[in-house]
Amino acid sequence: MRKNRISQEEFKKLAFEKDGVQDLYHELEEEYHLLAEMINARHETGKTQAEVAELMGVKTSAVGRLESALFYKNHSPSLITLKKYAHALGYKLELNLVSLEK
């Protein structure tokens, strides 16, 4: 028997109805956005974590920790590490500040 599946947007809407979820989502939004960009870039280049690790001169587990660290907030990678990751994929790292005032 196949269960009905809901879209990500529907899931998000339902989750936001619970107390505190929307605040937590916005608190993690910047980290999640960067993490998604990193993983999407790796997938676009067709590289595995092992291949990126070799190009960075680190162990595969270090790339796995890097890709999960931003989401789980258990480690803040250095700018040098983020730059090495980007270069291993043929990208460059760009950072910018965006005003919170609209």
Image: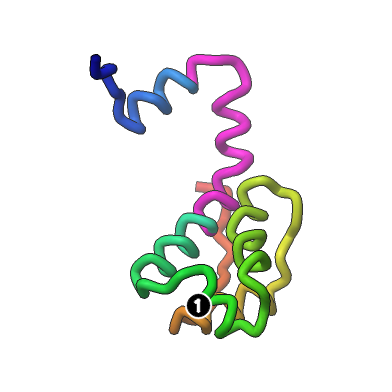
Hey, what amino acid is under mark 1? Glu
Residue 13 on image: x %, y %: 40, 23
Q: Please tell me which residue lies in front, 68 or 70.
A: 68
Read off the magenta span. 16-34
Residue 68 located left or right of residue 5: right
**What residue lies at 49% left-to-right and 22% top-to-bottom?**
16
**What residue lies at 35% left-to-right and 32% top-to-bottom?**
8
**What residue lies at 67% left-to-right and 46% top-to-bottom?**
72
Vertical position of residue 3 compared to residue 72: above or below: above
In reply to whether residue 18 is colored magenta, the answer given is: yes
In reply to whether residue 102 is colored magenta, the answer given is: no
Name the image quarter holding residue 54.
bottom right
Residue bearing mark 1: 51
Vertical position of residue 48 compared to residue 74: above or below: below
Type of secondary structure dominating the magenta stretch: helix
Which of the image's four quarters has the N terminus?
Answer: top left
